[in-house]
Amino acid sequence: MAFSPDGRLFVNEQGGNLRVIKNGTLLEEPFLTVSVNSFTERGLNGIAFDPEFENNGYIYVYYTTNSDPIHNRLSRFTADTSNPDVAAAGSEQIILDLEELNQSLHHNGGALNFGDDGKLYVGVGYNTNDTNPQSLATRLGKILRINSDGTIPSDNPFVNTTGAKGEIWALGFRNPFTGAMKPGTNTLYINDVGLATWEEINAVQEGGNYGWRICEGPCSDPDLIDPIYAYEHPGEIRRVVAGGAFYDGTQFPEEYTDSYFFGDFLGNYIKILTPDNEAADFLTNTTTPVDIDVGPDGSLYYLSFLEGAVHIVTYASEPPTLPPGEPPGEPTSEPPTLPPGEPPGEPTDPTMEKSTVFATLDGKRYLVEAESTVVRVTAATIDAKESVTVFLSGSGTVELTLEKIMIDGISSIMAGSQEVPFTTVDSNAANTTIAFSMPTGANAVEITGATVVPEFGIVAALVLATSLVAVIGIARFSGRSLGFRL
């Protein structure tokens, strides 16, 4: 997501819509819709505004195409002069068509940032191909630097290197899908999602090599550049660094100025990285933060993936009034102004019913979201197994979509010792959707089939199709109080 110079907030939906939040209201009509391949981590993944947006109306988006050959694309659209809340019809100009993707659905990248030099910096994932990040013959696994029209700047570091792609600015990245440019500079911080050990924040240098697939996290190789900050995964529990923004507002105290906010998608928190590269806790119980930005009002905004919602964090000079018995120092929240007739704090779709459950695989718990009878499951790094166990509350008909890269050839569903009949609702190259009825008294089913598990996978692809529902919460905090409540 990104703020336009006039204060509107533009938010990507993975399914291809670019939505606009204007004066606190989510507009019904998208700014644009592109046809995307949105399986797993593919889709509409990046946005940036041209430095001359107020004069030319240019918006850049990064998305995965939906026609063969499947690849990631950078395009420019122009706002309609008669209605700047939508793109002008037929205004798409393709800036970059990147290399064809292999069968991996992961590690697409998508970070887009303009520097003070007027150049556009593009983070491109390595497509789960170990040779890509260190090869100058491909743009995958790189940070690119281009002119706004897609041409290659003459001062790029590899522009005169035989066989190299001239757009490459830095190499050795895994999945640089978020990051931020320090305002008024060419200082680019890129979050690089790790495999199973480290998450990285890198200060990108011209021609620098950041190590993937040679090493992960801090390295001992003098030819590689270490991250300015890295943190380890806690044991076998996955972490995913996501979202980044430099604080340049005045709403927070001066001590926050030039600090870099970053989140963790699976850790469900947001932290601060000071100019001295020291990390401190900020919000400790967010829900799947995937992007962060600073608004023109100086507040911090973060996008929750599973909630499909933008949250606003403001500074309170005095501690908020807390309900009786609530410990002091923790932030409180209040719902924003919503359209007439809508209950405060509720999603815009009044029929949506959400409950949080969980799934287990080989004794490990993974995040689950259930909307009505559609179950959604995300999984962290796991070993190949022959079954998935899904824990559910309640009873009735369940519709479950499973990625074939996680489990294919479904042979049986068991609730304890009872076999559960199921039907195949849909099956395509990527997913199988099944339907079954939960037996009375059962709270879990075990689904058995032949599995092929990649290094990181999503059990149910539907979790990645969540849509923005509303700006649903404002948190106020005092000083360095931790926590978040909605």
Image (tube, grey):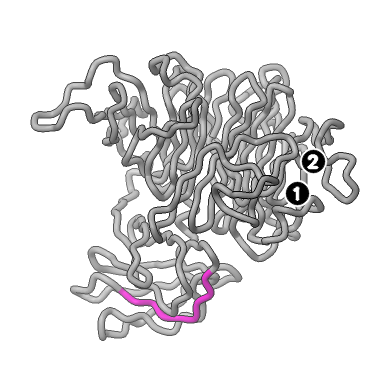
Residue in view at x 17 percent, y 27 percent: 328
Image-based side of 314 in relation to 409, left or right: left
**What residue sits right under mark 2 in the picture?**
167
Mark 1 belongs to which amino acid? Arg
Residue 181 inside the magenta-drawn segment: no
Quadrant location, the N terminus = top right
Image-based side of 482 in relation to 215, left or right: left
Q: Quadrant of residue 303?
A: top left
The magenta stretch is 445-453
Q: Residues within 10 Å of mark 1 (few under 14, many from 20)?
A: many
User: In this rendering, does residue 92 appear at all?
Assistant: no
Residue in the foreground of this view, choosing between 273 and 12: 273
**What residue sits right under mark 1 in the picture?**
139
- How far apart are the alpha carbons under marks 2 and 1? 8 Å
Secondary element under disc 1, as helix, strand or loop, is: loop
Mark 2 belongs to which amino acid? Glu
